[in-house]
Image: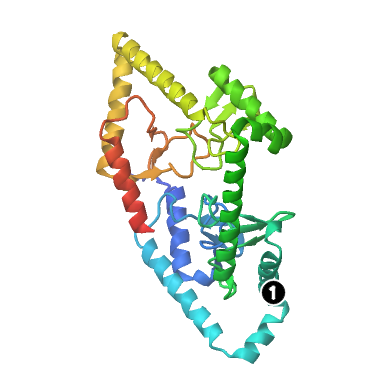
């Protein structure tokens, strides 16, 4: 009798996206010179922090998913290497350094020096974005007629006199603000908007009047803004019609209008809560509320397991928190199911971020 043949079942091991990401991190740690380090050069917070030089499609994010625990040590090591290289270049001597800068490889440094001189000579030709930046990686100054010409204050090529230039620019801005305030006090709010502000001031005043007459025709974005540069009110049927509370053309009665809008919004919230309490509860609704409550507790217990998107939301409707290992789990701070201790948690998270950076 022939012996029985044992059949083994072939098992295929699938290479997951997580394995690929971890392998890329290992390659970066082993050969950092094969990667572009874009951490201090990013103009978009969502751009990758590291990009492979021979394959731009391979990229890594420090705040992405499946980041190894040793990534902070790696970043510190890379920063130390860069600092050592900068010190070595600075100590090579004046003549050889000057020759090197005059070569074609250092055309970028020459262009940056030229831009700094252009800013000092004609600051009115540049946008001063220091107080409008939503990310430290965005440029501090951008040329008005050429958005590709940009300057960063923390650049290695910043001149020694940049501090004096910033003081001069700040003094000019303060003088302009005082002049505008004096003109506004002398001419009156509405009159200044119509006469001193020209056509644009008149259009803005018309929009403020339209908001006061029909606030339901406008989006109130005050509590949803992710940047100070975003408008506080936007017309529903025409997104080009927008209003900012810090505008010089804001009428003197805008404070009373905001109080009325807040009171009306509070009344609507109370009405919805009353209707919600009176409405019959269903098993589906109770399950949804329980799942949201569980997610809030998970965020409080382990905030590192969640992405904090409050400061980099693409739209006001995007979630404020999203679970790292399950993108379908999301939380909004404006949700009706937000717990009473949410403000304490947000304060704690902000303190952690400040300490981290």
* Residue drawn where x is 66% and y is 68% of the image: 116
Residue at 33 percent across and 22 percent down: it is 288
Closer to us: 102 or 235:
235
For the residue carrying disc 1, how many other residues have a C-alpha within 10 Å: few (<14), some (14-19), or many (20+)?
A: some
Residue 12 visible: yes
Q: Residue at x 49, y 31 (%)?
A: 317
Q: Residue furthest front?
A: 186
User: What's the residue at 39%, 30% (across, down)?
Assistant: 334
Residue nearest the viewer, comparing 223 with 184: 184
Side of 317 relative to 351 (left or right): right
Display coloring: rainbow
Percent across and percent down for residue 228 are 52, 42
Quadrant in which the N terminus appears: top left
Q: Which residue is label 1 attached to?
A: 110
Front-most of residues 8 and 4: 8
Number of labels in the image equals 1
* Residue 345 % position (x, y): 28, 41
Q: Is residue 1 visible?
A: no
The picture quadrant where one finds residue 269 is top left
The image quarter containing residue 280 is top left
Whether 119 is drawn above or below 186: the answer is below
Which quadrant of the rendered structure holds the C terminus? bottom left
Q: Position of residue 118 (x, y in %)?
A: 71, 66
Residue 175: x %, y % from top left: 59, 55
Whether residue 200 is situated above or below residue 161 in the rendered picture: above
Q: Is residue 161 left or right of residue 102?
A: left
Q: Secondary structure at mark 1?
A: helix
């Amino acid at each position: 009798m022939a012996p029985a043949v044992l059949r083994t079942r072939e098992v295929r091991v699938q290479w997951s996206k997580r394995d690929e990401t971890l392998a890329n991190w290992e390659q970066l740690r082993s050969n950092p010179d094969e990667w572009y380090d874009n951490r201090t050069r990013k103009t978009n917070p969502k751009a990758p922090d590291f990009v492979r030089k021979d394959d731009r499609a391979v990229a890594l994010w420090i705040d992405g998913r499946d980041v190894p625990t040793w990534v902070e040590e790696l970043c510190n090591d890379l920063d130390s290497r860069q600092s050592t290289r900068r010190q070595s270049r600075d100590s090579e001597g004046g003549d050889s350094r000057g020759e090197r800068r005059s070569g074609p490889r250092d055309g970028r440094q020459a262009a940056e020096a030229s831009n700094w001189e252009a800013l000092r000579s004609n600051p009115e030709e540049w946008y001063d974005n220091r107080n409008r930046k939503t990310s430290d990686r965005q440029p501090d100054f951008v040329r008005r007629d050429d958005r590709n010409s940009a300057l960063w204050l923390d650049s290695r090529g910043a001149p020694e006199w940049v501090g004096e230039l910033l003081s001069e620019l700040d003094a000019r801005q303060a003088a302009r603000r005082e002049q505008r305030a004096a003109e506004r006090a002398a001419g009156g709010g509405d009159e200044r908007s119509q006469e001193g502000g020209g056509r644009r001031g008149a259009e803005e005043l018309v929009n403020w009047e339209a908001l006061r007459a029909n606030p339901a025709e406008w989006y109130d974005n005050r509590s949803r803004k992710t940047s100070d540069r975003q408008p506080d009110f936007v017309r529903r049927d025409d997104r080009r019609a927008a209003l900012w509370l810090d505008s010089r053309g804001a009428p003197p009665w805008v404070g009373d209008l905001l109080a009325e809008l807040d009171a009306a919004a509070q009344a609507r919230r109370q009405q919805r809560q009353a209707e919600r309490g009176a409405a019959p509860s269903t098993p589906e609704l109770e399950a949804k509320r329980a799942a949201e409550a569980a997610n809030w507790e998970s965020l409080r217990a382990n905030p590192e397991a969640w992405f904090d998107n409050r400061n980099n939301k693409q739209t006001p409707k995007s979630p404020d928190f999203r679970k790292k290992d399950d993108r379908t789990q999301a939380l909004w701070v404006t949700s009706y199911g937000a717990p009473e201790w949410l403000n304490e948690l947000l304060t704690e998270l902000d303190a952690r971020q400040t300490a981290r950076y």
